């Protein structure tokens, strides 16, 4: 390969071109490079390794999981998640990924959601004996957090979502709610708690199509679809087995391996690393929208991706981790209404049992809780201690014992680039996994999956990229993507 073909690339200099040319002839066949060890990259790597490809996964961090990971916090000495991640029963591909790598038993499933008002009054939503979409009907009708007028309005709006998903008409979901006559209380105590947490964005900036998908697929389709799964271990522990899964199938996982660029060659892809350039037959870029275009060679393809990525804005999530000297509640988790803090995960209770059975470590007294604030733009610039003080004041409104408990330690984790904002019309800018380069593919929660930026969306993107690559390389026929959960009850009457 001549140096002229590399002049427009990040590696376009005579020395590098000579090095690349010498390696092309000796490259290893059927080698697939995966750049990024988040969920999208891991899903693609595991699927392709299972199909017989020789996978090499490059991750610049010393741990796997990307934005859904955990680490030992230097200020507390505790292992903390960068932000709490959960899954729902409708997340079929994420569940398939956990089963594939042997982590399915590390998820604890719940059928009941508890909504708490300041003062402690609880409303519990859970499925009963009625068929879908009415399976939550009795608990919903008896929930004291909503008035009868609120409930009748919500029921009418949910009926409108039953036949089919609403289209993205360029207007935010807040306008859809107005058109369907939702009361202010219904929005504040029903629609917002679910959607802001699921989509990590305020409703006046949220695509109607994605808001509708969340409610139709999780709240209406079946009781199983709405079950909530919470990891019983730190997030990175969920993915530790993914590395061995890849390695047992002849692949490699390289930590602290920072890729600075990739260049398509005549019959492969050159991967630029600080330790030297390497060649692969194919590559999947599983990177966030803010960095993926920087890794690609200049030209029309990269310019188009940069133009699309420029339309996306990140939305933050803040996790507030608190350790108390006593148990502050018997609840494992709860939705916290009408305040800045939105969810409480009682992690010492959620992890109890699994930790003792699998590590032999005794359960420690007290409470370790994580409070989550999605779309937390108001907290990003707030000093750490102010965030902790705010959280303690508000938490005490729901659990008065907090005023008596001793706070042993605390920390705040702000994931500023947690997800992309699912703005109206965003699908126009989400790229397909296939690129203009026949040996380079894309994965990531921002790639077109018809799902929002969730763990399920990330895994779907990894499987879709793996499918496209497998077809191009004739590695394996068929599909890696898992079918959606089927509708139950009366929802079977409506098309998907």
Image: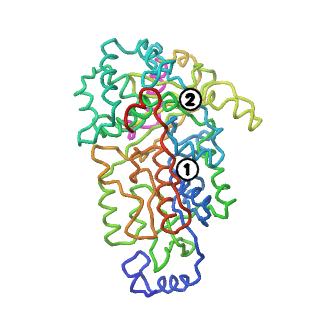
Task: From this view, report whether residue 407 is shown above or below residue 305.
Answer: above
Which of these two is toward me, 238 or 250?
250
- Which label sits in the foreground, 2 or 1? 1
The image shows residue 11 at horizontal and vertical percentages of 44, 77
* Main secondary structure along the magenta-highlighted residues: helix
Q: Position of residue 214 (x, y in %)?
A: 40, 35
- Relative side of 282 to 231, left or right: left
Answer few, some or many: residues within 10 Å of disc 1's Cα (few below 14, many 20 plus, some between 14 and 19).
many
| Residue for point 34% across, 21% down | 155
Q: Which residue is the site of mark 2? A: 369
The residue stretch that appears in magenta: 376-397
Q: Secondary structure at mark 1?
A: loop
The label on residue 421 is none
- Dot 2 or dot 1: first in sequence order is 1
Distance from the alpha carbon under mark 2 to that under mark 1: 22 Å
Q: Please name the residue that numbered disc 1 is placed on.
A: 65
Which residue occupies the extreme right position in the image?
360
Whether residue 206 appears in magenta in the rendering, the answer is: no
Q: Quadrant of the C terminus?
A: top left
Q: Is residue 350 above or below residue 139?
A: below
> Where is residue 480 drawn, in percent x and y?
53, 53
Residue 317: where, in percent of width, then height?
Answer: 43, 39
Picture quadrant of residue 55: bottom right
Mark 2 lies on a secondary structure that is strand
In the rendered view, tell whether residue 344 sits above or below residue 236: above
Taking the spot 52% from the left edge, 23% from the top edge, the residue there is 112
Tell whether position 394 is magenta: yes
């Amino acid at each position: 390969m001549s140096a002229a073909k590399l002049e427009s690339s990040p590696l376009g200099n005579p020395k590098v071109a000579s090095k690349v040319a010498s390696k092309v002839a000796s490259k290893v066949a059927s080698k697939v490079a995966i750049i990024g060890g988040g969920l999208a990259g891991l899903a693609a790597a595991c699927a392709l390794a299972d199909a017989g490809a020789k996978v090499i996964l490059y991750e610049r961090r010393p741990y796997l999981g990307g934005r859904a990971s955990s680490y030992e916090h230097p200020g507390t000495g505790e292992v903390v998640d960068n932000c709490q991640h959960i899954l729902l029963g409708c997340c079929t591909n994420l569940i398939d990924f956990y089963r594939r790598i042997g982590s399915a038993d590390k998820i604890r499933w719940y059928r009941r959601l508890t909504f708490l008002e300041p003062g402690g009054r609880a409303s519990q939503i859970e499925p009963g004996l009625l068929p879908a979409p009415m399976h939550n009907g009795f608990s919903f009708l008896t929930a004291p957090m909503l008035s009868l007028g609120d409930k009748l309005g919500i029921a009418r709006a949910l009926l409108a979502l039953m036949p089919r998903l609403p289209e993205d008409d360029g207007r935010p979901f807040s306008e859809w709610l107005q058109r369907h006559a939702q009361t202010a209380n219904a929005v504040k105590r029903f629609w917002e708690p679910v959607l802001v947490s699921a989509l990590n964005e305020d409703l006046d900036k949220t695509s109607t199509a994605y808001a509708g998908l969340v409610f139709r697929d999780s709240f209406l389709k079946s009781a199983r679809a709405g079950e909530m799964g919470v990891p019983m271990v730190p997030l990175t522990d969920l993915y530790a087995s993914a590395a061995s899964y890849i390695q047992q199938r002849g692949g490699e996982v390289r930590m602290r391996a920072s890729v600075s660029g990739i260049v398509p060659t005549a019959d492969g892809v050159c991967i630029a690393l600080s330790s030297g350039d390497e060649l692969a037959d194919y590559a999947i870029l599983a990177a966030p929208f803010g960095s993926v275009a920087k890794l690609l060679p200049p030209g029309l393809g990269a310019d188009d991706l940069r133009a699309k990525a420029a339309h996306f804005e990140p939305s933050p999530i803040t996790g507030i981790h608190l350790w108390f000297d006593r148990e502050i509640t018997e609840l494992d988790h709860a939705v916290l209404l009408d305040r800045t803090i939105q969810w409480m995960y009682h992690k010492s209770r959620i992890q109890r049992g699994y930790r003792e059975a699998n590590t032999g470590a005794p359960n420690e007294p007290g409470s370790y809780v994580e409070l989550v604030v999605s779309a937390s733009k108001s907290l990003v610039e707030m000093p750490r201690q102010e965030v902790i003080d705010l959280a303690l004041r508000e938490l005490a409104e729901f659990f008065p014992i907090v005023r008596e408990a001793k706070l042993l330690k605390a920390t705040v984790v702000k994931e500023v680039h947690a997800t992309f904002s699912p703005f109206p019309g965003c699908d126009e800018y989400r790229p397909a996994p296939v690129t203009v380069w026949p040996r380079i593919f894309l994965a990531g929660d921002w790639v077109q999956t018809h799902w929002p930026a969730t763990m399920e969306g990330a895994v779907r993107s990894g499987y879709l990229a793996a499918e496209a690559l497998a077809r191009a390389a004739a590695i394996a026929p068929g599909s890696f993507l898992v079918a959606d959960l089927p509708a139950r009850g009366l929802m079977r009457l409506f098309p998907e």
